Amino acid sequence: MKKIILPKINPEEVSREIGYFIYKSLIEVNSTGGVIGLSGGVDSTTAAALTKKAFDKYNSITSNKYLELVGYILPSNTNKSEDAEDGVKVAERLGIRYEIQNIEPILNSFHSTNPEAFESNYDKGNLMSRIRANILSTKASTERKTIIGTGNKDEDFGIGYYTLFGDGAVHLSPLGNLSKRVVRELACYLGFEDVAYREPTAGLEPGQTDFKDLGYGYDTVELIIEGIKQNFTLETLIKSPQAIEMINPQLQYSKFNTVEEVVGDILRRHYEIALPKAEIIHPPMAPVTLDYGGENE
């Protein structure tokens, strides 16, 4: 049976490509640097490390402009105390300016305007994500900086596992073409092996992990989405030895019971969530007829 091919990278080359993309994008808009939300997880750590490396390179070859990266650590009472501590450790290892701001007082202020958001952990969690995005956006605006995104390909473009106008509200997506698997590889290359295999969690609900929410890991998402790109059908994906070998061991811990259910959920999320969300972030404009004829001739 035909195999699903997973891409490989040269970490040094990809690091250089992403770095060039970052500082070129900032220079073009006369930005003074970047702001980034630091959770201590592999995605934000890798994005921050790549950005700092790019800024250091740019700053070493020019005297016209200095690019600065600032990390913002924005815990709530839902987060474990070590989450903020991990964010601080990353900032200090990178040698960047950082701030810590507990968002709980801001969150509580929404009781008066949006009490319905506190009726479920899901809605409350998304509200927290949008609060963080508002803080980052305002910091970026007042400092004339750029918001550096931390989402990876599996989460953002595979299954749309992010909050619209929350952690998806960024100016740049350095990791957007990289699967979680490849992000881990880059993290190790950049010297953050201790962070690379940390359990993924959004930290928006008590005891939440991405695996508990989804019922499968990101390596499974990558495999199935790559299969779609390589013209595998639902039927061939379900029968794929690669998919069976990867998914079956997860089922004992999952909310799903079969390979077919897992593959079906990934495809549903991809077509019904990820792609529509991407259109909203880059909203299509209504086609209209504009008549410029005659009057000014």
Image (cartoon, rainbow, N blue to C red):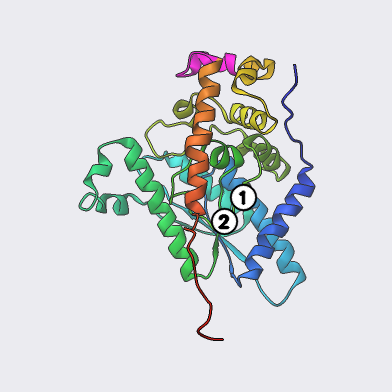
Is residue 122 visible in the rendered structure shown here? Answer: yes
- Type of amino acid at the residue the image marks with label 2: Ile
| 25 relative to 213 in the view: left or right | right
Q: Please, is residue 294 above or below residue 112 in the view? A: below
* Quadrant hosting residue 171: bottom right
Q: Which residue does the numbered mark 2 point to in the structure image?
A: 148
Residue at coordinates 66% horizontally, 32% vertically from top-left?
A: 226
Residue at coordinates 44% horizontally, 47% vertically from top-left?
A: 164
Magenta-tinted stretch: 247-258
* Quadrant hosting residue 182: top right
- Type of amino acid at the residue the image marks with label 1: Ala
Q: Which residue does the numbered mark 1 point to in the structure image?
A: 47
From the viewer's side, name the closer residue of 117 and 61.
117
Residue at coordinates 42% horizontally, 53% vertically from top-left?
A: 132
| 70 relative to 165 in the view: left or right | right
Q: Position of residue 165 (x, y in %)?
A: 43, 51
